[in-house]
């Protein structure tokens, strides 16, 4: 049940991010809901499930938009694994930690994309890219994290309740 639900959430996120999210862009900046999804799953379920969600979310991005296969997959897996390392150190009901981790993850994610795709090709406008893309996307994603994390938190609670009654031995 959890695998099916997670797969559906990843596919719905990908469809929404590539179609309907284009209508809420501000000056060409979109919230990175894939990173929100990866970090939220990593915080709610741990580093292994965060890495698996990152693998499949990145795999979808690689299949449809990637120029080098495995690039977004690796970034998603690394994001999920590293964000999941802190899942035992916070209360799930607290929204500050997901917002902070999503902001840090988007900042590092976009910086890695900049370093590997633009800097190696000779585009050296670091401050322009930080000011026009990375920082606005980080702020926009942080605001959007509250909505997505709340939905994923509710789905996770529902799934854990179902699993508790399903696997109860006594």
Image (tube, helix red, strand yellow):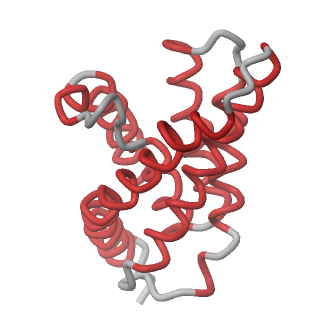
Out of 84 and 168, give the one closest to the viewer. Answer: 84
Instruction: Tell me the quarter of the picture where residue 75 sits.
Output: top right
- Percent of width and height locating residue 107: 59, 51
- Percent of width and height locating residue 91: 47, 88
Out of 148 and 153, give the one closest to the viewer. Answer: 148
Instruction: Tell me the quarter of the picture where residue 87 sits.
Output: bottom right
Residue at 43 percent of width and 81 percent of height: 92
- Percent of width and height locating residue 13: 33, 37
Residue at 52 percent of width and 14 percent of height: 65
Give the number of marks.
Answer: 0
Residue at 36 percent of width and 35 percent of height: 29
Out of 124 and 106, give the one closest to the viewer. Answer: 124
Residue at 43 percent of width and 51 percent of height: 37
Up/down of 63 relative to 18, above or below? above
- Percent of width and height locating residue 84: 64, 66
| Quarter that holds the C terminus | bottom left
Left or right of 2: which side holds 16?
left
Up/down of 5 relative to 46, above or below? above
Up/down of 147 relative to 64, above or below? below
Left or right of 39: which side holds 11?
left
């Amino acid at each position: 049940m959890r695998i099916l639900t997670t797969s559906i959430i990843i596919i719905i996120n990908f469809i929404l991010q590539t179609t309907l999210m284009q209508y809420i862009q501000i000056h060409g900046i979109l919230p990175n809901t894939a990173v929100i999804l990866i970090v939220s799953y990593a915080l709610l379920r741990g580093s292994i499930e965060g890495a698996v969600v990152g693998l499949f979310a990145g795999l979808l991005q690689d299949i449809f938009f990637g120029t080098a296969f495995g690039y977004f997959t690796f970034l998603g897996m690394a994001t999920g694994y590293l964000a999941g390392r802190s899942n035992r150190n916070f209360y799930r009901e607290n929204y500050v930690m997901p917002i902070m981790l999503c902001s840090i993850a988007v900042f590092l994610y976009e910086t890695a994309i900049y370093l590997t795709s633009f800097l190696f090709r000779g585009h050296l406008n670091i401050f322009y890219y930080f000011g026009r893309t990375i920082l606005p996307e980080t702020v926009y994603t942080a605001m959007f994290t509250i909505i997505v994390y709340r939905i994923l938190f509710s789905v996770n609670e529902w799934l854990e309740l179902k699993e508790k009654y399903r696997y109860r031995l006594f």
